[in-house]
Image (cartoon, helix red, strand yellow):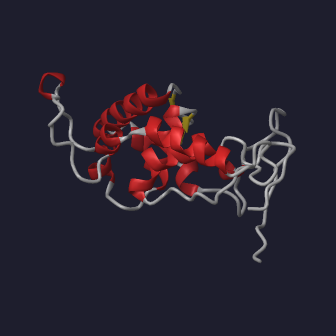
Amino acid sequence: EEELPIQMWLGVGESDFVFPELRKDEDGVPALQAKPNFAVCISGGGYRATTCALGWIRAFHSLGVLAKARYLCSNSGGSWFNTVFSYQQEVPTDVFLGKYIPPGQVTPDAELGVGSYAQVVADARMLPDLIGNILKGAASGDVFRDVDRVKLRAWSDAVGDAFFSRHGLNDADCGYAVPGLTTDR
């Protein structure tokens, strides 16, 4: 079993704290240090947020604004987009963002582009996956989630299947840890 090294930086919020990526030591990231202190933030809200995120980021990318941002932050449905945008390596950024289609030309049959996130959103069918995942969890007999410690597995799997898998990012065995809790992986 491979050990996973973890680093922790204390002092966030103190007046002399410098985030690791901005430090002038081995933790510093010169590409980020060269950018202005500017972030693009994507809000949450499920399908609506992930769809709006695609539109905003496509526009910011085409205007050259995105390349100037030091950070791209998100939560909830905006993170569905941001996760795939930030980590996928299946297609180039322009293919992923897809072409702009004016609202009057959007139809159920509109060609959104193979590899585009717009096609992923158009094809996403989360509700059937979510219901199926809930039923599988109930049928497993692990009603109190003693075996599967990831309490929201049905939801996480449905989001992953709908939005991450097309770009090779859906690892069903991945677990996340929140402050105060531990995970084996």
Residue 95: x %, y % from top left: 27, 51
In the displayed structure image, the side of residue 62 where residue 153 appears, left or right: right
- Residue 141 visible in this rendered orientation of the protein: yes
| Residue beneath the point at 56% across and 33% down | 76
Task: Give coordinates of residue 98: x percent, y percent.
Answer: 25, 44
Q: Does residue 40 appear in this view? A: no
Which residue is at 36% across, 36% downward?
Answer: 54
Residue 4 on image: x %, y %: 76, 68
Q: Quadrant of residue 65?
A: top left
Dividing the picture into quadrants, the one containing residue 49 is: top left
> So how many labels did they put on this image?
0
Q: Residue furthest bottom?
A: 1
In this rendering, is residue 168 above or below 57? below
In the image, 22 versus 151, the foreground residue is 151
Residue sitting at the far top: 104
Between 125 and 107, which is closer to the camera in this rendering? 125
- Residue closest to the eye, 2 or 97: 2
In the displayed structure image, the side of residue 144 where residue 54 appears, left or right: left
Point out the image quarter for the N terminus: bottom right
Look at 78% across and 43% down and name the residue there. Answer: 178
16 over 113 or under it: above or below? above
How far across and down, in percent of the image, does residue 94 sit? 28, 50
For the C terminus, the image quarter is: bottom right
Is 85 on the left or on the right of 30, as rendered? Answer: left
Q: Is residue 48 above or below residue 8?
A: above
